[in-house]
Amino acid sequence: MLAAFSRVVTDPLQRRMGLHRRRLEWLLRVLEADLLGEPGRNRLMRDHYVARLVDIFDLIALAMRVSHA
């Protein structure tokens, strides 16, 4: 329960420090380079980025189900 509520404090702090924006921009650069087939160093997708992508797909699926109901 403490872990769930700790995000209430840490997320606004990370946003103010710009960490969310930098991580998102980095993710988009890496995805763009991979999709364009640019050669480069081996890239490691961290678990929390993959988890956020899965969350986005879940939200899209939920929106589609709700809109068809």
Image: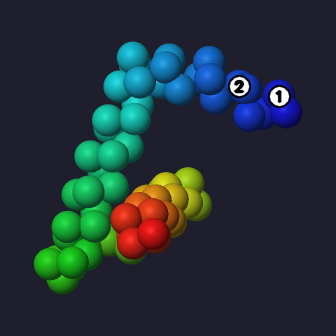
On screen, residue 51 above or below 8: below
Mark 1 packing: few (<14 Cα in 10 Å), some, or many (20+)?
A: few
Pointers 1 and 2 in contact (C-beta within 8 Å): yes
Q: CA distance from mark 1 to mark 2?
A: 6 Å
Residue for point 32% across, 71% down: 41
Along the line of sight, which residue is nearer the eye, 59 or 32? Answer: 59
Q: Residue under circle 2?
A: 6
Horizontal arrangement in the rendering, residue 25 relative to residue 48 (left or right): left
Taking the image as shown, residue 29 lies to the left or right of residue 7, namely left
Q: Amino acid at mark 2?
A: Ser
Q: Position of residue 14 (x, y in %)?
A: 47, 24
Q: Residue furthest right?
A: 1
The answer, for residue 45, to whether it is visible in the render is no
The disc at residue 12 is: none
Residue 12 lies, in percent from the top left, at 49, 20
In the image, residue 18 sits, relative to residue 29, either above or below, namely: above
Residue furthest front as drawn: 69
Q: Amino acid at mark 1?
A: Leu
Q: Would you identify the image quadrant in which residue 69 lies?
A: bottom left
